[in-house]
Amino acid sequence: MVIEPKIRGFICTTAHPVGCRAEVKRQIDYVKSQPAVSGPKKVLVLGCSTGYGLSSRIAAAFGCGAATLGVAFERPAAGKRTATAGWYNCAAFEEFAAADGLYAQTINGDAFSPQIKEETIARIRRDLGQVDMVIYSLAAPRRTVGEVTYSSVLKTTGEPYTNKTIDLKTRQVSEITIPQATEQEIADTVKVMGGEDWMDWMLQLQNAGVLAPGATTVAYSYIGPALTHPMYLNGSIGQAKKHLYQTAGQIAAQIPGVHSYVSVNKALVTQSSAAIPIVPLYVSILYKVMKEKDLHEGCARQMYRLFSQKLFGAAPQTDEQGYLRLDDLEMRPDVQEQVSLIWEQLNSQNVSQLADIDGYWDDFYRMFGFGIEGVDYKQDVDPDVAIPSIHS
């Protein structure tokens, strides 16, 4: 069938298997073009199928030569319905890893669930013995614990917040007011996106004897500039990220010898960030400024830099709060000053000139395998692609 992008809200309901494969290969080729990293050799990636999780797995495998076990929750193709982009990404990753003689297997299911934790531990014990790195890159809207399902919200705390936003389809700039979260909504968001599940994973891995002594674990977060703070850093999601950072310290305290970090990454077009009001407009301006200054990095460049410079160089590079700062280029004063100047004067008439809307859309479509150089999108393709390590 000929597969075309179908956009609904901030997601694309179709994905292109050939395009996704080409995008995975592009990231792999970048990492392989860089110097090898003396890093981990057996890596568990929780949330391995898209965005920073996928790029982390690529950096570990093709930068460090690591065996990788990934956990993702993706949907295979069914009839005329394509698989999710994450499914195609995992299939491509396993293909390229096998070609290079690297162990790569994927477990498909809800990483929050006890069943998937047990299956993952059994797979590590059977195939790897122990893992020396755990990457926690889960970004889910809800989490079920026992009989209760908790849902996260993207709201402020304290009071509502009004600022500019953009309809990316029409390129119309308008104002949006983000409502205040209730105490229950904040608690539920922390339950979904905080560090509780990260801690659960680490303790279960340790108790099962499959976590190597001195292992490293890292989870991902974002801080951003002042204009995004009311609905991110100080919003409901920000409260969850504060809990995530507290959990990093608790993991290190409860599992002696484990090195536990939170990496603060740069704002990029991801399926998660696309859903946050105000952020897509900010990202579009940031892209323009950073590209003009030759500072722009995608997921692959950032994750390679995380491994090669921040984590596994001479010594881990953290700020005074203990964060690994991959947003250091984004938060440079000259970058943020220019972003702020553009933000103040930006409107529907000048947004195409002052912001990189085309670049935003390019990255958005690439997430789903569309707009990739060298792919013939008029060609019939089979949407039913198998992930080699998944047999059901």
Image (tube, grey):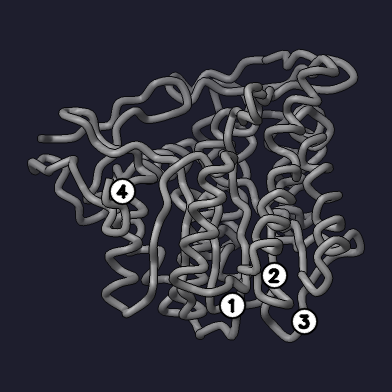
Q: In this figure, which residue is indicated by the disc labeled 2?
A: 216
Q: Amino acid at mark 3?
A: Ala
The residue nearer to you, when weighing 375 against 356, is 375
Q: Are marks 1 and 2 in contact (CB under 8 Å)?
A: yes
Q: Which residue is mark 1?
A: 40
Marks 3 and 1, how far apart at CA? 14 Å
Q: CA distance from mark 3 to mark 2?
A: 13 Å
Say whether marks 1 and 4 touch (CB < 8 Å): no
- At mark 4, the secondary structure is helix
Nearer to me, 387 or 354:
387
Residue type at mark 1: give it.
Answer: Pro
Chain-order first, disc 2 or disc 4: 4
Residue at 30% x, 26% y is 6
Q: Are marks 2 and 4 in contact (CB under 8 Å)?
A: no
In the rendered structure, which disc, 1 or 4, sits on the residue that comes first in sequence?
Answer: 1
Q: Is residue 390 visible?
A: yes
Q: Which residue is mark 4?
A: 88
Give the spatial CA distance, label 2 vs label 4: 28 Å
Quick check: 104 left or right of 117? left
Residue at screen point 80% across, 29% down: 235
Q: Secondary structure at mark 2?
A: strand
Quadrant for the N terminus, please: top left
Q: Could you tell me how far apart the alpha carbons at marks 1 and 2 are, in whole angstroms?
A: 8 Å
**SS of the residue under disc 3:** loop
Give the residue type at disc 2: Thr
